[in-house]
Image (tube, rainbow, N blue to C red):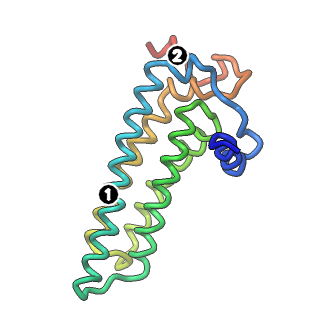
């Protein structure tokens, strides 16, 4: 079994019935699609650095005898894992897999809301982590902005949908 076959099995688990649907090559390779994914990769890289930084800060506090609560440890590990998962979705979406674009767009819209609500719970997290959560949310909102652009929604529309079924055709956005 080669790597792509293994990854297609992972895709089947993550994407379900729609895991076999790809967007047309011209939509995938369109300069605006490629530019959006370049920016998404940059923003995800910042998210990963931010997540690793949170783990390092928590470990440094614990290593110096400070108290790091269970919610702080859970949040650092879970968010870092989520961000790595989003990187997988980004990679697969950039290859044209529609299911991964849908998952990426959904999570990029939901995670900032959840993160900000959690940050607003009094005394759940220390100040440094609340700041990290706000930064995480702002960056994730930036990712969602790229994913929900008219061009990206048109590029990743369901196969068989006509341009009039999409928010706006690519020609209308130029």
37 displayed left or right of 25: left
Q: How many marks?
A: 2
**Circle number at residue 170:** 2
Nearer to us: label 2 or label 1: 1
Residue 117, placed above or below residue 155: below
- Rendered-image quadrant of the C terminus: top left
User: Residue at left 36%, top 52%?
Assistant: 47
Q: Position of residue 24 (x, y in %)?
A: 63, 20
User: Helix, strand or loop at disc 1?
Assistant: helix
Q: Position of residue 68 (x, y in %)?
A: 33, 82
Q: Position of residue 77 (x, y in %)?
A: 44, 68
User: Residue at left 22%, top 84%?
Assistant: 64
Q: Quadrant of residue 37?
A: top left
Q: Position of residue 128 (x, y in %)?
A: 26, 69
Q: Residue furthest left?
A: 64
Q: Quadrant of residue 96?
A: top right
The one nearer the camera, 146 or 36, is 36
91 displayed left or right of 54: right
Residue 168, placed above or below residue 74: above
Q: Are marks 2 and 1 in contact (CB under 8 Å)?
A: no
User: Residue at left 44%, top 64%?
Assistant: 117
User: Helix, strand or loop at disc 2?
Assistant: helix
Q: Residue furthest front?
A: 1
Which comes sooner in the sequence, label 2 or label 1? 1
**Circle number at residue 119:** none
Residue 155, placed above or below residue 81: above
Disc 2 crowd, CA 10 A, few/some/many (<14, 14-19, 20+): some
- Residue located beneath label 1 in the image: 50
Give the Cα separation between the discs numbered 2 and 1. 34 Å
């Amino acid at each position: 079994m080669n790597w792509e076959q293994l990854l297609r099995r992972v895709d089947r688990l993550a994407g379900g019935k729609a895991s076999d649907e790809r967007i047309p090559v011209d939509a995938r390779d369109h300069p605006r699609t490629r530019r959006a994914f370049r920016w998404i990769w940059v923003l995800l890289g910042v998210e990963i650095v931010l997540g690793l930084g949170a783990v390092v800060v928590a470990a440094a506090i614990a290593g110096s005898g400070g108290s790091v609560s269970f919610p702080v440890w859970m949040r650092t590990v879970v968010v870092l894992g989520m961000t790595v998962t989003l990187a997988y979705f980004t990679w697969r979406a950039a290859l044209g897999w529609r299911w991964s674009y849908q998952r990426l767009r959904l999570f990029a819209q939901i995670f900032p809301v959840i993160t900000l609500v959690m940050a607003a719970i009094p005394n759940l997290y220390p100040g440094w982590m609340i700041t990290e959560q706000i930064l995480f949310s702002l960056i994730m909102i930036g990712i969602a902005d790229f994913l929900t652009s008219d061009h990206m929604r048109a590029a990743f529309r369901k196969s068989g949908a006509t341009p009039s079924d999409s928010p706006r055709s690519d020609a209308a956005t130029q």
